[in-house]
Image (cartoon, rainbow, N blue to C red):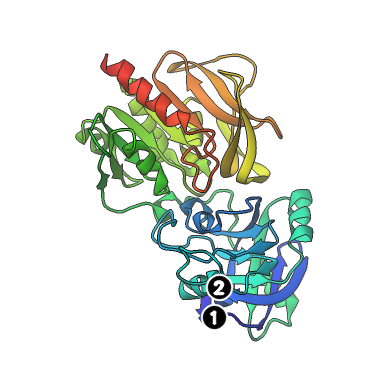
Amino acid sequence: MTTSNRGLNTAPAVLVLEDGRTFRGRAYGAVGETFGEAVFSTGMTGYQETLTDPSYHRQVVVMTAPHVGNTGVNDEDPESKRIWVAGYVVRDPARVPSNWRSRRTLDEELAAQGVVGISAIDTRALTRHLRERGAMRVGIFSGEAIADEAALLAKVRAVPQMKGADLSGEVATTERYVVPAIGTKKFTVAAVDLGIKGMTPHRMAERGIEVHVLPANATVEDVYAVNPDGVFFSNGPGDPATADHPVSVMRAVLERGTPLFGICFGNQILGRALGFGTYKLKYGHRGINQPVQDRTTGKVEVTAHNHGFAVDAPLDGPSDTPYGRVEVSHVCLNDNVVEGLQLLDRPAFSVQYHPEAAAGPHDAAYLFDRFVSLMEGQRA
């Protein structure tokens, strides 16, 4: 990706999809070129959390909400130390932010971090196109030399696809770190970082859990070196079919019977560890308004999602696995995609969505309490 920071400007820009459709608009953020998988997010707020979610690595995010940037950028809400999206697409960016916590404009932040974006395009038409044709490779080009669309299309089609991409090691921590419990320490959890969001260990810390965050390449020995009461596998980018190492580590955890919780990529890892396959969704689930039913209680939750792959597990009744019976605990009410797995004979479960809820909603926060209950039961 080549960039030059210019702040808010009217430089011409063009978005080119791999099927040849183009959208012309204005540069937003850094000026240059960038490539990735075009996906759309349906959240009307929380753009700062979206931008800094490592699961968006190598993806160009299209915001379906037309007006973006009105609350600016602050120093409290990032989910990681940098913006991870490969590119950003908005229709009507705010000219002046208005929020008491704002420190700078979204355009300034994108430019400062070298993120190429585009504004003033019909994001509704683009979203409809992606829903009909599916998520696909895309390029955003701004500044000089954007007239030759055939040459730009050739560049887009030369970019690797998301299917088959092994990306968690590119976003995970390289060094172990500890998030201390808030108040009295009750448990120790080893968290395998596959692209973890900052709010996740915080939610556990709120419940008296000391979280040891480990690199994606952590071994079974690394996990148990912290003497954990439970093991957690995080969200992350890429194709779960490539995640052989995390799958092997999770199988070792299942063998030992240690309480286990997985979120998003962690749900797909659990699916693979149990013997299920995974597959790529047509356009994925991304946003903070996705309806999910907890089949163990019948309760419907509005939840935060960011995933383009899913677990291929049967919805009708428990399935037998090498680690006992497992059932689909949660399902998306829009399309019946598997949104959670629960083992019936071992203390392990996972969900495909984001109960840490940054940004919102908080319907699924109880899942961290479920994890605590598993560790309490194991200790008893």
Residue extending farthest front: 100
Query: x%, y% of residue 366?
Result: 46, 29
| Residue shown at 64% from the left, 79% from the top | 142
Q: Is residue 319 above or below residue 108?
A: above
The image position of residue 161, as x and y in percent, is 60, 55
* Residue projecting furthest to the bottom: 144
**Residue pictured at 38% horizontal, 31% vertical:** 250
Is residue 25 visible to the viewer in this orientation of the structure? yes
Residue annotated with mark 1: 7
| Label 2: how many Cα within 10 Å (few below 14, some 14–19, many 20+) | many
Which picture quadrant has residue 107?
A: bottom right
Q: Is residue 315 left or right of residue 86?
A: right
Horizontal and vertical percent position of residue 38:
65, 58
Residue 273 visible in the picture: no
Q: Earlier in the sequence, mark 2 or mark 1?
A: 1
**Figure quadrant of the C terminus:** top left
189, 269: nearer the viewer: 189
Task: Judge whether 224 appears above or below 156 on screen.
Answer: above
Residue located 32% across and 39% down the image: 205
- Residue 62: give x, y in percent of width and height: 65, 59
Amino acid found under the numbered disc labelled 2: Asp
Q: Residue at x 30, y 44 (%)?
A: 214
Circles 2 and 1: CB atoms closer than 8 Å: yes
Front residue of this view, candidates 179 and 280: 179
* Residue occupied by mark 2: 107
